Amino acid sequence: MIKNGCSATCSQIITSCTAPSCSIIGTTVCGLGGTTSICGPSGTGYTYLWNNGSTSKCRTVFAGAYTVTVTNSGGCSSSCSVNVSAHRMMQTDATEENDNLQVTAYPNPFSNSATIEFHNPGEESHIVVELYSLAGNKIATLFDRNVSQDVSYKVEVNAENLLKGIYIYRIANGDKVINRKLILIK
């Protein structure tokens, strides 16, 4: 531009930066308390920042929501998220000697809590569910009441105050008893 016989020149370098494509690989774990590996996208010169402050490309995680911000060598970044879900592993403990009570415990093994679910297809009765150490010491009575016919019931086993190891859950339906293992991992 020229004005009054004077001229000026200016320049500016414009750098084009393309944001990296962002995707997270890994979306499921087996059982509550299970882990899986999730990874941000691969790329030359990429840096990673996860929502927990981790800067590695891959992380070992439990079920939950995770976000990573990926930055390329040009300083451009993009973010993506994933919800890692837990598939319920189920061990069914139906017994031949007690055909009037069906029992299922899941997840087994467990880390935070387990559910003992039972169904009484027979007539109304009184059910007692107890938890024992492997040495046979009673830890807790989880359920002690009358149950209706053709109704399913659930009992939660909370691992907060338990040590890792093998436990026995005992379900008594009158004089008929079911004893099964429940494995706690921490």
Image (cartoon, rainbow, N blue to C red):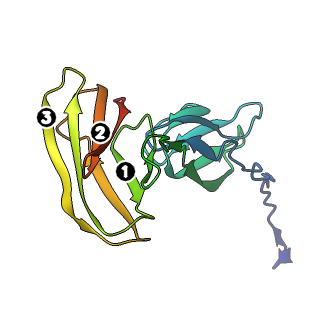
User: In the image, is residue 73 above or below residue 141?
Assistant: above
Which label's residue is closer to the chain start, 1 or 3?
Answer: 1
User: In the image, is residue 163 above or below residue 99?
Assistant: above
The x, y position of residue 101, in whole percent, is 42, 54
Which label's residue is closer to the chain start, 3 or 2?
Answer: 3
User: If the image is split into quadrants, where does the N terminus sit?
Assistant: bottom right
> Image point 26% across, 40% down: which residue?
159
**Label 3 amino acid?**
Lys
> Image point 43% across, 34% down: which residue?
109
**Label 1 amino acid?**
Ile
**Badge 2: how crowded within 10 Å, few (<14), some, or many (20+)?**
many
User: In the image, is residue 186 above or below residue 127?
Assistant: above
Residue 138 numbered mark, or none: 3
**Badge 3: how crowded within 10 Å, few (<14), some, or many (20+)?**
some
Disc 3/disc 2 C-alpha distance (Å)? 10 Å
User: In the image, is residue 141 above or below residue 132?
Assistant: below
**Mark 1 sits on what residue?**
116
**Mark 2 sits on what residue?**
169
Q: Are marks 1 and 2 in contact (CB under 8 Å)?
A: yes
Asked which secondary structure carries label 1, the reply is strand
> Image point 64% across, 47% down: which residue?
27
